[in-house]
Image (cartoon, rainbow, N blue to C red):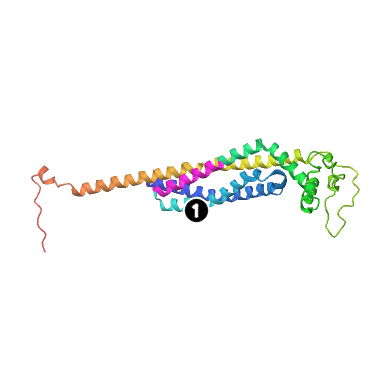
Amino acid sequence: MALSSNCWKYLVLTFNILFAMSAVVLFGMSGYLLYRLFIYRHFIGVSVEYPAILLLMLAIITCSIAWIGWRTAKSMHQIHVIIAGLLIILIVVVEFTCFVWAMVVWDNIEIDIKTTMTSYFQLTTDNKDTNADAYRWDRLHVKFECCGVSGPSDYSSSGHVPFSCCGQGPLDSVQKPYTADCAKLFQRGCGNLLHDYARQQLLLVAMVALTASLLQSSGIFCTFFLAHAIKERRRASLRHSISVREAFAAPDDSLLSNPTAPAPTLPKY
């Protein structure tokens, strides 16, 4: 039983190393996906980023739980090992919840993006003095090769279409910013393209959360098997101690069973 508990101990220690490594990978991937959503937050809304934010926070917490699991596996205290297993269960459950949340947002994102983009477009056209908003639209036009929310017709009320709608983005302020001859406008709107982009990022967030929850769930079994092995080892140790005490406390019946045996002599000093 001692060998079995030691085997589970080293398995749990190995899992916690992999657990910490997965947390680092999870942190990098969730941070990257959050960045890809964050740079278009004015067009898609902040609520789309919440699953990625939760996944990033889970990556940080996972590192702490991996350290706790390492310490408890080395100490071989049953209650501490069980607590570490419960923490791993909590992380896995929240990661799966993050997967479900990302898929729900992925399914309902079209209406949210269209509403957010339309409101932001109206705000940009109303506040003509705000260069930052116009610059964001220029970057969006050049990046996705699109124009407006639904197409160039969105700028009919303003009387002119920005040069970014034909691929000419804002240059350095020292140079001439809009001097290109816009011969061909992008006819497609940015709404559908940004919708597909956001859905792709959310799908990646969901897949990362699901993969992490499935891989990290293996540590639950290892941890609780270790707790069970510690319990069985303590029971075996207790039974051995009781048997030893009973052996020393038992009366010597050898004289009764063998009357011809020589009587014990007193020690000589």
Q: Is 237 located above or below residue 267 in the figure?
A: above
Occupied quadrant, residue 52: top right
Left or right of 189? Residue 20 is: left
Could you tell me which secondary element the residue under label 1 belongs to?
Answer: helix
- Residue at the image point whose x is 20% and y is 49% from the top: 248
- Residue at the image point whose x is 74% and y is 43% from the top: 119
Camera-side residue of 27 and 98: 98
Residue 59: say if magenta. no
Occupied quadrant, residue 50: top right
x then y, percent, for residue 95: 56, 42
Which residue sits furthest front? 126
Left or right of 131? Residue 113 is: left
Left or right of 241? Residue 230 is: right
Which quadrant: the N terminus?
A: top left
Camera-side residue of 208 and 35: 35
Residue 196 showing in the rendered view: no
x then y, percent, for residue 137: 78, 47
Number of numbered discs visible in the structure rendering: 1
Q: Is the magenta region chiefly helix, strand or loop?
A: helix
x then y, percent, for residue 187: 84, 39
Circle 1 Cα neighbour tier, 10 Å, few/some/many (<14 / 14–19 / ≥20): some
x then y, percent, for residue 82: 42, 46
Which residue sits furthest top? 107
Which residues, given as a range, are shown in magenta? 78-95
- Inspect the image, locate mark 1, and give the three-letter code of the amino acid beneath it: Trp
- Residue at the image point whose x is 53% and y is 42% from the top: 92
User: Disc 1 designates what residue?
Assistant: 67
Which residue sits furthest bottom? 269
Residue 77 showing in the rendered view: yes
Camera-side residue of 166 and 76: 166
Which quadrant: the C terminus?
A: bottom left
- Residue at the image point whose x is 75% and y is 41% from the top: 118
